Image: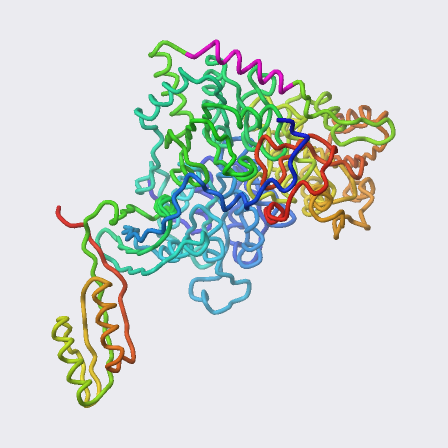
Amino acid sequence: MTREMTGAKMVVQALKDQGVDTVFGYPGGAVLPIYDEIFLQNDIRHILVRHEQGAVHAAEGYARSTGKPGVALVTSGPGATNAVTGLTDALLDSIPIVVLTGQVPTFMIGSDAFQEADTVGITRPCTKHNWLVKDTDSLSDTMHEAFHVATSGRPGPVLVDIPKDVQFATSDYSAPKPSTSHYQPIVKGDLEEITELVAAIETAKKPVFYTGGGVINSGTAASQLLRELVDATGFPITSTLMGLGAYPASGKNWLGMLGMHGLYEANLAMHDCDLMINIGARFDDRITGRIDAFSPNSKKAHIDIDPSSINKVIRVDIPIVGDVAHVLEDILKVWKARGRKTDEASVAKWQDQITEWRKVNCLAYTNSEKTIKPQYALERLEELTKKHDRYITTEVGQHQMWAAQYLGFEDPNRWMTSGGLGTMGYGFPASIGVQMAHPDALVINVAGEASWLMNMQEMGTAAQYRLPVKQFILNNERLGMVRQWQELLHGERYSHSWSEALPDFVKLAEAFGTKGILCSDPADLDDAIMEMINYDGPVIFDCLVEKHENCFPMIPSGKAHNEMLLGEAETQGVIDSKGSVLV
Amino acid sequence: MSALHIKKGATRHSAYNLRPTFSDVQERHTIAVLVENEPGVLARVIGLFSGRGYNIESLTVAEVDHTGHLSRITIVTTGTPQVIEQIKAQLGRIVPVHEVHDLTVEGPSVERELAIIKVVGAGDKRVEALRLADIFRASVVDSTLNSFIFELTGAPDKIDAFADLMRPLGLVEIARTGVAALLRGD
């Protein structure tokens, strides 16, 4: 089917044909023809954000919570440069998003025209791939290929830069067809390696599954297969920040999150295991800690769709390149065919050891009747919201780690957080994207006041579209994680890690015509949270918490998994000068 | 193994630098990359090397298949075996990259480079330069009364050797193409 139409119309037609129902964007001179086409149709909803960074994070939230690619539309120059943080965030967390940017007309490119920027040049290192479309003839195919690249293999952000004259000119539109480009990543794992892994599973005495965002990216089938494999083998399972929800937090083999602020039992299981099965994780430095002391006695298997993840940081014994769902299916097939064997006695002993570690109760904290402890706030939030159809986003910092520790995720796609890039300001716009995709769900952004202020302009978006996103701000009037590091590493010199001019969040909410709730007394917390849940509209919940609480457990920089700090005990001077070089 | 009693200063090294299971030996590899000949593809490859801190000793690029729109980039790089593996895997991730071949591993291969070398001098030195050029099978592509430009093709070592000999004889300028390489046999 070919039809002649303008480039601008092609863009909108291609979005429809790709199944896009929501676009987050901000208009400007170089995308006006596309905005005109958006005006003339009703199939695609356009959400007007208040800053282009918000558009990209909203698209990420949409993508992460649906498994479908998110779409953002921004103008040239500053519109495109404002999208860079979101693109980089999506690249590091492998989130499929398609960002469309306007560009000055082709005949003005290179002339330092008004709002001109070398968008494909600037975004080359922060996209999976990008295109500058120089003529309308190739526009529809490029649009379709953009969706193909964003969603196949290891997902990621792509960008299509469309000059204004290309939007005005006409050409034949071609509908999407199966991609014929050479970019077709392999999804099936090598059967020999899979068999070797199964053999290792059969004999392992102290095995552990270490799962990551790749399981979520692989789709809900991957999470189902993972649950089947974990429950059938009875092996303990831990996950990275990005992988939470793939295996249910209520599952009996669940160890909790691992890594720098992961659980004691999870990190010690990683350190002491004899078989580590990495499924869709990438041995990030938040996970491994000190590399030469990382899980010294284990055989390591690594399932990843991206060959460059294999042996990048940690040398593995059984590398399997493939899509998690496909590989798990084959593992289960081979393992069942060989008689569903495990070393049950040894694994039971290993589980006993883990039970011993659990008794340390690493998430214990000293509660207070006077001030709200952040951990307590999250425990109450968990208790009062876990029965809801709930989605959680977060900003970045202590609150993010506490949320990962104290909230339980039963399903994939329910937890949206900025893992790799650690983007403060991610959570609020992401919550808007999630709410757009799930209009009836309870969407909560667990935030710190400092992160939240970075994209607070999106209150305008939430208010305009009456999106009932709940902004649960753990307000310690500090950059909590920065403050914690300054305490541990920099002699308690709290250089610029607090704000002396915080807004009155209740009045701020009211200024946007919505609801603000202030809570500072632990006794009032439950009622206040219920009030937040029951309010039909956006809420800013200003939860004044203990100002100097540190986030534990913690593996200090440059330390191994078995060198965790569990609490305030003695933290001074624990990280030496070499360790303090690390972030 | 109490987590609460950590020896202070127990860590001697930066965690990022410790890769005990990997070899430290620097190896030189020639990598051939077949890429879609589209705008920006060279920038993607070079950006990968600079962004991830890999070395480029030499790089050549030209379209080799006009109808198929394919270019061949030949890169000579150095690094530990683990870095070389990463370079290849990272190159393979670039969407318009079709194939990545490590000619050093898949070899044996032939490597050739072309150089043009300007030598300025008179008298004995001029005669000696011409004599050496003959031995190296370099051809004279330009000459004036006091200068020659030699053209020389060969492995990078041969060009190095010739340039070293020409230096005392009046070498003033040299232009090299970088390495082009192919696997031997079929």
- Residue B154 picture quarter: bottom left
Q: State whether the magenta stretch is mostly helix, strand or loop.
A: helix
Residue A202 image point, x, y percent: 40, 15
Is residue A366 visible in the rendered structure shown here? yes
- As for residue B149 lying within the magenta part, the answer is no
Figure check: A152 above or below B60:
above
Residue A279 image point, x, y percent: 46, 28
Is residue A3 visible in the rendered structure shown here? no
Figure check: A53 above or below A204:
below
- Residue A250 picture quarter: top right
Left or right relative to B43: residue A533:
right
Query: Which image quarter is the N terminus of chain A in?
Result: top left
* Viewer-proximal residue among A78 and A419: A419
- As for residue A347 lying within the magenta part, the answer is yes
* Viewer-proximal residue among A207 and A334: A207
Figure check: B35 above or below A106:
above
Q: Which residue is drawn at 81% across and 28% down?
A: A528
Left or right relative to A462: residue B119:
left
Q: Which residue is drawn at 37% across and 39% down?
A: A176
Q: Which residue is drawn at 51% across and 48% down?
A: A37
Q: Residue at x 46, y 50 (%)?
A: A8
Residue range (magenta):
A342-358
Which coloring applies here?
Answer: rainbow
